[in-house]
Amino acid sequence: MTAGLQANEFKLVGGNPSLDFVNTVGGWGGNPLKKGPRDYRDAVLSEKLDGYADLVVWSRHVGLLTNKEARKFLRLAEQKPQAAEAVLERGLKLRGAIYRLFKSVVENWRPDAADVERLSEELSVARSHEKLIYAENRFSWGSDAGEDALDRMLWPLALSAAGLLTSGDLSRIRQCGGDNCGWLFLDKSRNRSRQWCAMNDCGNLAKVRRFRQRQREGG
Ligand SMILES: [Zn+2]
């Protein structure tokens, strides 16, 4: 199994692992099948996690797995392709739920119970692996090694999403205003003015568009 993507194709602009996880799509767009008053724009426009191997490469890239662990999980996935595929499917469902939960924060909507439930279930799995560790004269939280647990990268993602959602300060969560982007990020700018996932991507496109608009209007 070879990963379809090189790690450097994944941009990390979210400021939080769970937001970067949401940004493993080319963009989030309107869902034509969606009925109801709320359009979460949760259709995946271009999937970057085409296989379990992509999930492993990305997890290594964000630091959720070491190189050694990533290699081991890629090997394990070759031995258990169906189990690996099932983890990817679970991961993508979790990603959708995390996206919609934060989107509802951004829009000030009451979140869908199904999404709360999905994250809560993954959180229970993650918590079931938590361990109290005593080393170097202090206590800390760790997790059991999860040596053969193909879903191990999902644990910190569920924990980081729930951690951010319960952190109290959700006012810095933003959605990029770029066309067909919809990426999420934490606005850490001092005056809370960040509009774009990346200035040299969506920000530039918007500048070019405004420039052309002015030219047209100027005649
Ligand atoms: Zn963007």
Image: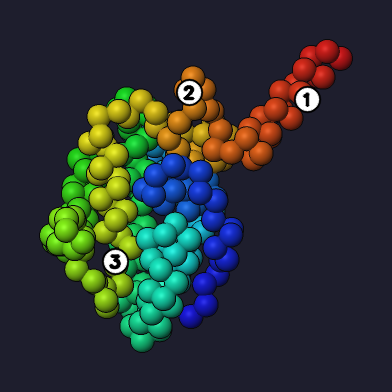
Visible residue check, residue 116:
yes
Separation of marks 3 and 1 at Cα, in angstroms: 48 Å
Secondary element under disc 1, as helix, strand or loop, is helix
Residue 64 in the image, given as x and y percentages of width and height:
37, 61
The amino acid beneath tag 3 is Arg
Which residue is label 3 attached to? 152
Secondary element under disc 3, as helix, strand or loop, is loop
Which residue is label 1 attached to? 212
Nearest to the observer: residue 33 or residue 44: 44
Looking at marks 1 and 2 on the same chain, the residue that comes earlier in the sequence is marked by: 2
Residue 106 in the image, given as x and y percentages of width and height:
37, 29
| Label 1 crowd (10 A; few <14 / some 14-19 / many >=20) | few
The amino acid beneath tag 2 is Arg
Q: Which of marks 3 and 1 is in front?
A: 3
Looking at marks 3 and 2 on the same chain, the residue that comes earlier in the sequence is marked by: 3
* Relative to 216, residue 40 above or below: below
Quarter of the image where one finds residue 167: top left
- Circles 1 and 2, Cβ within 8 Å, touching? The answer is no
Separation of marks 3 and 2 at Cα, in angstroms: 35 Å
The amino acid beneath tag 1 is Arg
Rendered image: mark on residue 190: 2
Looking at marks 3 and 1 on the same chain, the residue that comes earlier in the sequence is marked by: 3
Residue at 16 percent of width and 58 percent of height: 137
Separation of marks 1 and 2 at Cα, in angstroms: 30 Å
